[in-house]
Amino acid sequence: MSENGNTNTNTALVTLRQDLEKAMPKLQEVAPKYLKVERITRILLAAISRNPKLLECSRESVLTFCMQCAATGLEPIGAGGAWPVPYRNKNGKIDMQFIPDYRGLVNCAKRAGCITDAYAEVVRDNDEFEYSLGLDPQLTHKPARGDRGRIQSAYCVFRLPDGTRRFVVMDKDEIEGIRKRSRASDNGPWITDESEMAKKTVIRRAMKPFAGMSPELDAAIDADNATTGLEQREPITMPKAKTPPAQTPAEAPVSEGPAPAQDEAPSREQLLEECNALVEKAKASKIKKVADAVKWGWEGGEALEGLSDDQLTAIRSMLKC
């Protein structure tokens, strides 16, 4: 590289370092207590200095990568953490992709207290492999010496906090189905590191029952799904109030006595008053229903007055349960 090229690279690294330093307070707000954001930025800058292609990534994607490291508690160190991978987007620009290493997913689950250990292996055509489920699950795997053949399946063994061992097995067709659903199915690690991707796929399947056990584990799984194009979470839509069909006089039911009084739909003012009272009551009792209301389109800091009648009705129903 020319002297001018070295100067430009050094200048770009200095500018990036300054931008990352400015972002540190926001990163620390998101990061778990055990993770120091200074270490994230230091390791990332070291990786960028070794791979100039990463320096071409958009500044926004680099900052997003650091935010994902903070949210998952994973360091950008590759094995056991996350991989910073340059990826050319549809607009022709290069973005830095956050790809959790499969051992990083295991680390997240261990920190969440879901498991104490886990590992994955691939099974090839010439290996001896048997497993059975039921009341007494068993798994035996004897890898062949020499040419082991092509991958036929993969499995993950994990140990629960009480010492119980469990395992998950996926055959070639299941793994292939996951690969085909990935937007990078015909390039990248699925082609260059097939066995590692098979391990990662079965580990992700094994960790699925632990979703919700920690924000870091959920963030790592979501980030990995977003990168590979798998299992995107659909936004929750508001339920619409059902309006009963109008009845003609001929269709109206015949009643022998006076019709019972029907509740009139509350006015918007009444909805707002009742929702505000329910929210205050929920906050005072520290119940979970306020958090649940967020899933229905209401952010706790947002004024209720800005919501639609349907949203207010849904929140009122939820908080009254």
Image: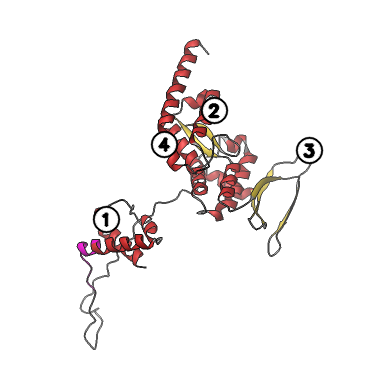
Q: Amino acid at mark 3?
A: Gly
Q: Which residues are magenta?
A: 263-272
Q: Marks 3/2: CA distance? A: 35 Å
Residue of label 1? 304
Q: Residues within 10 Å of mark 1 (few under 14, many from 20)?
A: some
Local crowd size for mark 3, using a 10 Å CA cut-off: few (<14), some (14–19), many (≥20): few
Q: Residues within 10 Å of mark 4 (few under 14, many from 20)?
A: few
Secondary structure under tag 2 reads: helix
Q: Report the residue marked by disc 4.
A: 25
- For image coordinates 79% across by 40% down, the residue present is 145
Q: Is there a contact, CB below 8 Å, between mark 4 and mark 2? A: no
Circle 4: element type: helix
* Local SS, label 1: helix
Q: CA distance from mark 4 to mark 2?
A: 22 Å
Cα gap from disc 1 to disc 4, whole angstroms: 30 Å
Residue type pointed to by label 2: Ala
In contact (CB < 8 Å): disc 3 and disc 1? no
Residue furthest bottom as drawn: 256
Q: Which residue position is annotated with label 2?
A: 47
Q: Which residue is mark 3?
A: 146
Per the rendering, the mark at residue 237 is none
In this rendering, does residue 93 appear at all?
no
Q: Nearer the viewer, mark 3 or mark 2?
A: 2
Tell me, yes or no, whether the two marked residues, 3 and 2, touch with CB atoms within 8 Å: no
